[in-house]
Image (cartoon, rainbow, N blue to C red):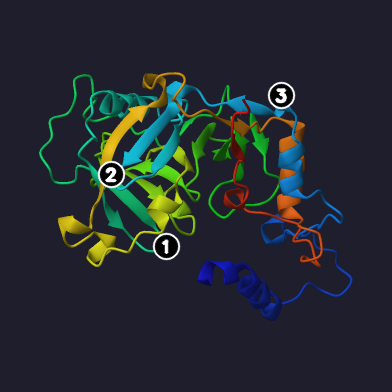
């Protein structure tokens, strides 16, 4: 909060220290320019935009990029992987799935307003062949070659934010890099202190307010597209950082597979709204300017994490 108040406080101090002589023009400082919301009246209903989006506005999720987590108690969690942002970690995740490494794993940590984490924990389970034990720091990628749709609103954690390949991203045109953002349901790699980067064997999903301070500090490998409630609605762990005290409280997995390894007639099939489509632009406008009978004043702005990318089952 101190930093948020700093510009206004400094402006007051500057005013008290000595105003310019009357009649003398002073150029406004860009440092103290303030962004003001610009509400759009009668913006489109975002839900209706999604409902009416044409077929070409959607892209299918590649079965090789869809992780299917089946719980022993029933239910499943589907995770779309993002190989263009963390290729080595995603390759490790695929190796873990194909070698059954998670078939006796479990959710062992649920921290309120933060994360649900799973894996083999402290169990000594040999890494599958081909897994890179110490992947590179895949916390950002080159901006070059990545078509970003700017969100159009300021952000507290990145020079610019938007969407690329239907993923929420922060990016810096001057430094030429882009990165995935820690929005609700995004999936990241658990790791020890630097220089460790984590193998991808221990993963977490965001189940609370977006912890954007983790951006550029941890590799994000995807997002939960189905079943986030099976993680977020769990009892919170009572130990430090939300770890469960006893193994009986863990949520065990039955099986984890890639959709590409499931027979075609049985595999789940989903698609996401393309962020480079006209429908997505209208969707963003709707998210930033809610109308209807409930909202009497459109906000005129939106956070990147409050623009969840629409996902749906592929039409038959």
Q: Relative to 19, is 94 on the left or the right?
A: left
Position of 134 with respect to 35 (left or right) is left
Q: CA distance from mark 2 to mark 1?
A: 25 Å
Camera-near label (3 vs 2) is 2
- Callout 2: 10 Å neighbours few (<14), some, many (20+)? some
Whole-percent x and y of residue 302? 67, 54
Q: Nearer the viewer, residue 89 or 258?
A: 258
SS of the residue at dot 3?
Answer: helix
- Tag 1 residue: 113
Q: Which residue is mark 2?
A: 72
Residue contact between numbered discs 3 and 2, judged by CB atoms under 8 Å: no
Q: Is residue 197 visible?
A: no
The percent position of residue 32, horizontal first and vertical second, equals 69, 62
The image shows residue 289, relative to residue 296, as above or below, that is above
Image-quadrant location for residue 241: bottom left
Residue under label 3: 56
How much space separates mark 3 and mark 2, taking CA atoms? Answer: 37 Å
Q: Return the x and y of residue 205 as percentages of the image width and height.
A: 39, 47
Which of the two discs, 3 and 2, labels the residue nearer the N terminus? 3
Q: Residues within 10 Å of mark 3 (few under 14, many from 20)?
A: few
């Amino acid at each position: 909060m101190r930093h948020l108040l700093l510009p206004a406080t400094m402006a007051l101090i500057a005013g008290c220290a000595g105003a310019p002589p009357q009649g003398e023009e002073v150029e406004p400082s860009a440092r103290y320019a303030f962004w003001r919301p610009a509400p759009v009246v009668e913006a489109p209903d975002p839900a209706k935009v999604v409902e009416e989006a044409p077929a070409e506005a959607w892209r299918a999720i590649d079965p090789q990029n869809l992780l299917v987590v089946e719980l022993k108690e029933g239910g499943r969690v589907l995770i779309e992987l993002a190989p263009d942002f963390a290729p080595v970690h995603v390759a490790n995740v695929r190796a873990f799935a194909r070698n059954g490494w998670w078939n006796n794993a479990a959710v062992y940590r649920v921290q309120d307003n933060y994360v649900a984490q799973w894996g083999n924990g402290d169990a000594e389970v040999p890494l599958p062949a081909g897994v890179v034990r110490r992947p590179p720091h895949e916390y950002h990628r080159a901006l070059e070659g990545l078509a970003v749709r700017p969100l159009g609103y300021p952000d507290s954690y990145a020079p610019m934010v938007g969407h690329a390949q239907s993923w929420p991203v922060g990016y810096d045109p001057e430094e030429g890099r882009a990165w995935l953002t820690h929005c609700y349901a995004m999936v990241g790699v658990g790791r020890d202190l630097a220089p460790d980067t984590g193998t991808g064997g221990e993963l977490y999903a965001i189940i609370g307010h977006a912890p954007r301070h983790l951006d550029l500090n941890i590799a994000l490998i995807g997002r939960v597209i189905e079943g986030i409630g099976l993680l977020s609605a769990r009892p919170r762990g009572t130990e430090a950082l939300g770890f469960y005290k006893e193994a009986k409280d863990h949520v065990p997995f039955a099986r984890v597979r890639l959709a590409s390894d499931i027979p075609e007639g049985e595999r789940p099939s989903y698609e996401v709204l393309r962020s480079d489509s006209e429908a997505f632009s209208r969707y963003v406008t709707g998210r930033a300017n809610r109308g209807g009978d409930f909202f009497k004043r459109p906000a005129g702005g939106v956070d990147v994490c409050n623009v969840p990318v629409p996902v749906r089952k592929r039409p038959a």
